């Protein structure tokens, strides 16, 4: 492999593979001396690579890099120790996926110009251009009918895989409270969400005739703060800050959570007085900010709980 076909790390890059894809190589793979490609024609493999590259640039590369990062607070060699940020990251991953899926009409057909077909989605521009050179119908190569099915099938499998292995798990009763140690805005909203339930269900509520009244926390949707927030440097992978609507993020990560179960989680229950203070604070509090003495109180709490689990 020549130097031109490698990236800075010495590995063969997708860009290099695509640029090195020539008619001679295609001819060789097909067992013929020469392959004639007319102007505007799009080789099947090249078109597929354009789709793959566009998907990676839109929804895979950044998340892969995020998973490789160290926790910026705990420092070097903490690769993979990002549990406290994963709850909020699920929304980023989910939103990226949704932005690629086209809207559909009443008949269930994709609407042109939406999702990956949106002209503003520059990552898929080369793929959309390559589709123009795909034959409408062919008995020898993948035709337009084949490529028309590719995005929907691919995104369906991707969505199901994400839901099964990532999104559903991090939004479960067992893990959603990890967000209390993540982004300061999400932490405060989670604490307030739990406190709302705890206050509402703090004791048996009865009407004038002594009959139990169903608490509002069991029948009403909690109203999260509706504003744009910055998810912070942990999510910034060199492309600028990631800003999200806090209300939409919170509604997504708590969608399938049972507040009763989360409130009674051993960790939440053990440190409830601290969570309550976070919820009732007039300001957003960064739990990992160092105090004047250079110490961080929340780290002591988490380490204490971790040691308690291992010892017992």
Image (cartoon, rainbow, N blue to C red):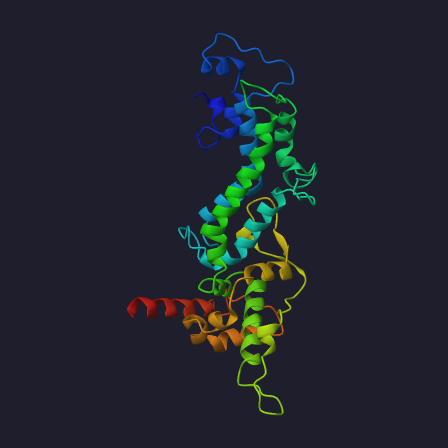
- The answer, for residue 54, to whether it is visible in the render is no
Residue at the spot x=56%, y=54% of the render? Answer: 91
Picture coordinates of residue 68 (x, y %)? 45, 46
| Residue found at the far left of this picture | 311
The quadrant in which the C terminus is found is bottom left
In the picture shown, does residue 145 fall above or below 295? above
Residue at the spot x=41%, y=53% of the render? Answer: 78
Residue at the spot x=63%, y=27% of the render? Answer: 131
Using residue 179 as the reference point, say whether residue 124 is left or right of it: right
Using residue 278 as the reference point, say whether residue 223 is left or right of it: right
Picture coordinates of residue 113 (x, y %)? 70, 38
In the picture shown, does residue 81 fall above or below 13? below
Count of numbered marks? 0
In the picture shown, does residue 195 fall above or below 289? below
Front-most of residues 281 and 91: 91
The quadrant in which the N terminus is found is top left
Q: Image quarter for residue 11?
A: top left
Q: Image quarter for residue 199?
A: bottom right
Picture coordinates of residue 6 (x, y %)? 47, 27
- The answer, for residue 259, to whether it is visible in the render is yes
Front-most of residues 222 and 195: 222
Picture coordinates of residue 153 (x, y %)? 54, 38
| Residue found at the far bottom of this picture | 209
Residue at the spot x=50%, y=53% of the render? Answer: 167
């Amino acid at each position: 492999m020549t130097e031109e076909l490698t990236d800075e790390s010495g590995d063969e890059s997708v860009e290099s593979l695509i640029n090195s894809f020539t008619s001679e190589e295609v001819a060789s793979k097909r067992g013929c001396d020469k392959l004639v490609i007319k102007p505007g024609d799009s080789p099947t493999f090249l078109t597929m690579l354009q789709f793959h590259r566009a998907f990676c640039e839109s929804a895979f590369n950044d998340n892969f890099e995020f998973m490789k990062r160290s926790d910026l607070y705990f420092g070097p060699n903490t690769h993979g120790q990002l549990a406290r940020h994963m709850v909020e990251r699920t929304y980023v991953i989910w939103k990226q996926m949704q932005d690629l899926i086209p809207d559909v009409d009443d008949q269930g057909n994709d609407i042109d110009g939406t999702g990956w077909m949106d002209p503003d989605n520059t990552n898929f521009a080369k793929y959309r251009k390559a589709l123009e050179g795909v034959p409408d119908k062919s008995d020898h190569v993948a035709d337009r009918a084949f490529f028309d099915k590719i995005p929907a099938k691919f995104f369906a499998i991707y969505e199901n895989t994400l839901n099964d292995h990532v999104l559903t798990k991090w939004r479960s009763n067992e893990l959603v409270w990890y967000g209390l140690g993540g982004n300061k805005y999400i932490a405060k909203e989670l604490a307030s969400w739990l406190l709302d339930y705890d206050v509402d269900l703090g004791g048996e509520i009865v009407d004038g005739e002594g009959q139990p009244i169903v608490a509002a926390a069991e029948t009403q949707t909690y109203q999260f703060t509706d504003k744009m927030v910055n998810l912070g440097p942990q999510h910034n992978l060199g492309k600028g800050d990631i800003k999200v609507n806090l209300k939409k993020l919170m509604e997504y990560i708590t969608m399938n959570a049972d507040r009763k179960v989360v409130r009674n989680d051993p960790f939440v229950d053990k440190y409830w007085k601290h969570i309550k203070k976070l919820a009732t604070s007039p300001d957003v509090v960064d739990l990992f900010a160092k105090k004047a003495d250079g110490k961080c109180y929340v780290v002591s709490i988490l380490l204490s709980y971790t040691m308690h689990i291992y010892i017992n």
